[in-house]
């Protein structure tokens, strides 16, 4: 039996009521209309967050989990975490109250995505990704929302999924600031990895429209492995501990309430790709001054950049509160200015952000982000790989094996040619 709006009982097959003639109620389609209308009204979703920390792929999710243990939420207020991968994300303990989302694309059954095209398709075809992003609390045309993403662009998951995900965040809030901490493959990594990195970067920097990312902080994996740093108790940091340390510094400047200063500068100067120079745990007693710590930073950039290319320098500085009196704004500004004069002849703009720790040691954490308008050096290995791929594999059937199309490949080439021309 079925009911009409006047509660008359009718046989199920009828479309109109045999007593009053009104159309019968199809409960299933009415319910789906209702749920669709609720889903599309993001005002009913989670309360608005200020900051989002997103890890994509195996390495990205791992970075996210270590960032959680560094308590980044104390630096970036009202923080929501999201980890996305095609494989299951292991070893996660989550409390009910924690604002942490974990999404296994294709319910974690897809496994490793070795190629960017497959990662992209996995993201586009997953039924939960876009609704989850829609309901995370991003909305409005609001500069008071910032997204920090961590990933390794050599991975097929990260390079394919992150652009799809970030495109949706831009749609929801076109004014939000997006910064991507990205591990780039070493020169000796496989063609696959370098092609992924090129494709992913091209999607993040988009040609002919506003870039998805306001800053891609690019770290070459081979350089990262050789970097040395010191932790809070004086112990030497392992490679895996350097990246959360960098992310913690980034969180001080590139999240709300400070993200707009950095994001607007990058947009204005068109320096969307930044090379970080990192010095973690430099003892003031040993180094003597901020200038000396800045010098130790610049001796080892984490990506390939020439000092002549640098037009923007952005300093992120973390000092123990008890030493704050030795670092007045005037001193930081002066030392940064003379450092800039010494190293970057074409510099046009500089900016800094200081954060404080309660620790009792005398160690400074410093990161200088260097940006130029020419990204050809940063992408040169990846570009060589992509150009070769484009020449060798240009028939649609072959491209399908990689999850790509001719149009996608041409668009990727055009995007990065545009960026560094
Ligand atoms: N930071 C870090 N990067 C790594 C490590 N191992 C590999 N990588 C980089 O990560 C890339 C692979 O990224 P991954 O997250 O595994 O790929 P995805 O899961 O498909 O997104 C490689 O191209 C390397 O450049 C590691 O142990 N730590
Ligand atoms: Mg993976």
Image (cartoon, rainbow, N blue to C red):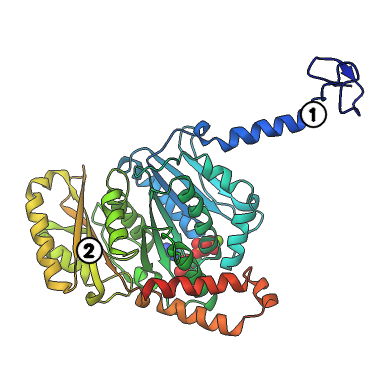
Instruction: Identify residue for label 1.
Output: 26
Relative vertical location of residue 186 with respect to residue 333 in this rendering, above or below: below
How packed is label 1: few (under 14 Cα within 10 Å), some, or many (20 or more)?
few
**Quadrant of the rendered image containing residue 302:** bottom left
Ligand 2 image position (quadrant): bottom right
Secondary-structure class at tag 2: strand
- Dot 1 falls on a residue whose secondary structure is loop
The structure residue drawn at horizontal position 35% and vertical position 68%, both measured from the top left corner, is: 224
Q: Is residue 71 visible?
A: no
Does 301 sit left or right of 339 as displayed? right
The N terminus sits in image quarter: top right
At horizontal 21% and vertical 69% (from top left) the residue drawn is 298
Return the residue at label 2.
313
Judging depth in this view, the residue of 318 and 362 nearest the camera is 318
User: Is there a contact, CB below 8 Å, between mark 1 and mark 2?
Assistant: no
Between the residue at mark 1 and the residue at mark 2, the CA separation in whole angstroms equals: 62 Å
Residue 294 locus on image (x, y percent): 17, 64
Residue 112: image tag:
none
Depth check: give the residue in front, 23 or 65. Answer: 23
Residue 20: x %, y % from top left = 86, 16
- Give the crowd class for mark 2: few <14, some 14-19, many >=20 residues within 10 Å: many
């Amino acid at each position: 039996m079925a009911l009409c709006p006047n509660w008359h009982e009718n046989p199920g097959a009828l479309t109109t009521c045999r007593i009053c003639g009104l159309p019968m109620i199809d409960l299933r389609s009415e319910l789906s209309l209702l749920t669709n209308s609720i889903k599309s009204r993001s005002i009913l979703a989670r309360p608005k967050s200020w900051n989002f920390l997103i890890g994509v792929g195996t390495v990205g999710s791992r970075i996210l989990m270590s960032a959680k243990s560094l308590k980044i939420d104390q630096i970036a207020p009202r923080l929501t975490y999201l980890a996305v991968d095609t494989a299951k994300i292991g070893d996660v303990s989550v409390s009910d109250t924690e604002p942490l989302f974990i999404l296994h694309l294709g319910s974690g059954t897809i496994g490793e995505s070795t190629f960017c095209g497959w990662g992209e398709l996995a993201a586009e075809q997953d039924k939960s990704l876009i609704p989850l992003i829609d309901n995370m609390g991003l909305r409005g045309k609001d500069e008071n929302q910032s997204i920090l993403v961590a990933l390794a662009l050599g991975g097929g998951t990260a390079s394919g999924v992150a652009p799809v995900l970030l495109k949706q965040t831009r749609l929801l809030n076109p004014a939000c600031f997006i910064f991507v901490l990205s591990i780039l493959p070493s020169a000796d990594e496989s063609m696959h990895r370098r092609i992924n990195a090129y494709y992913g970067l091209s999607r993040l920097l988009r040609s002919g429209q506003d870039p998805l990312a306001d800053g891609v902080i690019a770290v070459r994996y081979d350089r990262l492995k050789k970097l040395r740093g010191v932790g809070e108790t004086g112990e030497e940091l392992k490679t895996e501990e350097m990246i959360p340390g960098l992310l913690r510094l980034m969180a001080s400047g590139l999240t709300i309430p400070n993200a707009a200063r950095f994001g607007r500068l990058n947009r204005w100067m068109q320096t969307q790709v930044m090379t970080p120079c990192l010095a973690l745990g430099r003892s003031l007693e040993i180094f003597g001054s901020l200038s000396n710590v800045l010098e130790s930073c610049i001796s080892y950039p984490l990506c390939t950049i020439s000092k002549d290319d640098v037009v923007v320098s952005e300093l992120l500085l973390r000092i123990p509160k008890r030493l704050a009196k030795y670092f007045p704004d005037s001193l930081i500004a002066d030392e940064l200015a003379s450092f800039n004069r010494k190293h970057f002849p074409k510099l046009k703009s500089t900016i800094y952000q200081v954060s404080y720790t309660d620790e009792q040691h005398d160690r400074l954490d410093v990161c200088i982000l260097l940006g130029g308008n020419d990204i050809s050096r940063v992408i040169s290995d990846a570009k060589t790989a992509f150009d070769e791929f484009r020449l060798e594999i240009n028939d649609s059937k072959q491209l399908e094996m990689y999850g790509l199309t001719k149009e996608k490949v041409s668009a990727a080439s055009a995007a990065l040619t545009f960026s560094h021309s």
